[in-house]
Image (spheres, grey):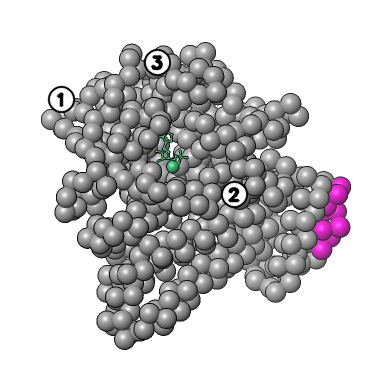
Amino acid sequence: MAFHLAPSDSIELVQYIAPTPIPEPYWVGFSESVARLLEIPCQDGLPLNPEYLQLLAGNQTQLVTEGKTFAPFATAYSGHQFGVWAGRLGDGRAIYLGDIQGQEVQLKGAGQTAYSRMGDGRAVLRSSIREFLCSEAMHALGVPTSRALAVVGSDMAVARETLETAAVCTRVAPSFLRIGHIEHYGQNQMHDALRLTLDHLIEHHYPECANESTPYLKLLEQIAVRTARMVAQWQSLGFCHGVLNTDNTSLLGLTLDYGPFGFLDNFQIDHICNHSDQGGRYAYHRQPEILHWNLYCLASAMLLPLQEELQRVHGCSEEASIEMIKSTLDQFNREYALHWQSLFRRKLGLKTALAEDLPLLEQLMQALHQHQIDYTLFFRNLSEGLGVPHALETWYERYAQRLEIETESQDQRLEQMCHVNPKYILRNHLAQRAIERAQKKDFSEVQKLLKILESPFATQAVSEEYTQGPPPELAHLPISCSS
Ligand code: AMP
Ligand code: MG
């Protein structure tokens, strides 16, 4: 972890702090797939070693029987929230346990840290279940994301709009570094921390940059490329993040910090999933431009090392450096457009790429929006050869004509389309049902939903309701930042 390379243990960088225990923890959800990644032996769907329950509750920092001791810590970062500089934020409720099998492991909701500001350092059961299920759903959909090993609950009360109970979500990623970390070091002239972190990123996560003449510029480009591909995937799946602040934006191009996220039910191009986002800054159709904006924040934060490198290698003036940095950031738009088109061609089963595909796609988006068609069901029904709703027949005729150029058989095409157009996504009302049962201590629906979402493309022997949009009374569940 980069923080261990740090020249000092200033609170502006890191705070070594143990989680605050919670009373009488119990398992709410557990992912065997993530356990395998961490090489944690399991039996009957839970760790073989019973100490894990206390470890992941934040009640102990050792695995006595395995001779392992962790040195937990929280990190400082800053960031732009809703487009405005917010100053120092940091891990206010997420505490790093340490590394397991080369993955960083964090306990989210593990109590206060130096960065908690006014917060209680806790997460509620509701939001922990949402983060757990969505992390694993996104992974199964092929989207780069932090993973979630477990949710551990406790009857301890936590005050939000109403009284709720506490939970800890164990999340896992190759790195939890955010744009906000770089902004923090840049803003506070923490030059050593800035360079060490950039070098750490190159060494461990972007080795392709190491032998470039300008490694930092290459790093910026590669972060932009990964971010562009990630958001193109979000758009193609109808995923809205909800709070795309720079402190929630991964430096590895991972989907991070699941809060008031949502998958589109009926397609609405300007859908806002976050109840607190009145201006719609993070609406579905704005996500790519917002991430591009966030990358500008990243570039400004690492301006000094970038300029120094460009001056030394290419003899660039300040102005010339800035031009090079800007054109590097333009890669985002190119990469996004390419990836978006390629993903949507796959959704429609188009192997060849024609200029006329773009207007065909645009016509489809407009029709889906205008007629409020369920986004996931539309593409899945198309993939299962079930045709389209009446309102889309004009579009369908054009699409059918376009298909004549393709050389594959219809069966082959439909099969491939079923591998990219999911049948099962984490719709809000499905998450809500699992949450309400969990609040009554029945955790079976959390685990059932996890299993379904782990194979989103296969038709499973489960009730049709897992594929359907919400009933009208559950179509607009208010999901806010208060988690
Ligand atoms: P978020 O909107 O969840 O990404 O959080 C933004 C910032 O607020 C981060 O620095 C979080 O660590 C912090 N934060 C959010 N909720 C809490 C809480 N309950 N207690 C302490 N810090 C929190
Ligand atoms: Mg956050």
Figure check: 320 above or below 187: below
Disc 2 marks which residue?
282
Q: Secondary structure at mark 3?
A: strand
Q: Residue at x 27, y 47 (%)?
A: 12
Q: Residue at x 41, y 24 (%)?
A: 167
Label 1 and label 2: CA atoms lie apart by: 45 Å
**Residue 482 belongs to magenta span:** no
Residue 436 x %, y %: 56, 19
Disc 1 marks which residue?
64
- Locate residue 46: give its quadrant: top left
Label 1 and label 3: CA atoms lie apart by: 26 Å
Q: Secondary structure at mark 1?
A: helix
Figure check: 407 above or below 130: below
Numbered range of the magenta stretch: 390-398
Horizontal side of 390 relative to 244 (left or right) equals: right
Residue 364 x %, y %: 76, 57
Q: Residue at x 71, y 32 (%)?
A: 475
Depth check, front residue: 402 or 134: 134
Depth check, front residue: 179 or 153: 179
- 1 and 3 marks in contact (CB < 8 Å): no
**Residue 395 belongs to magenta span:** yes
Local packing at callout 3 (Cα closer than 10 Å; few below 14, some 14-19, many 20+) is: some
Disc 3 marks which residue?
156
Label 1 sits on what residue type? Answer: Val
Q: Residue furthest left?
A: 67
Question: Any atom of ligand 1 within 8 Å of the CB at mark 1?
Answer: no
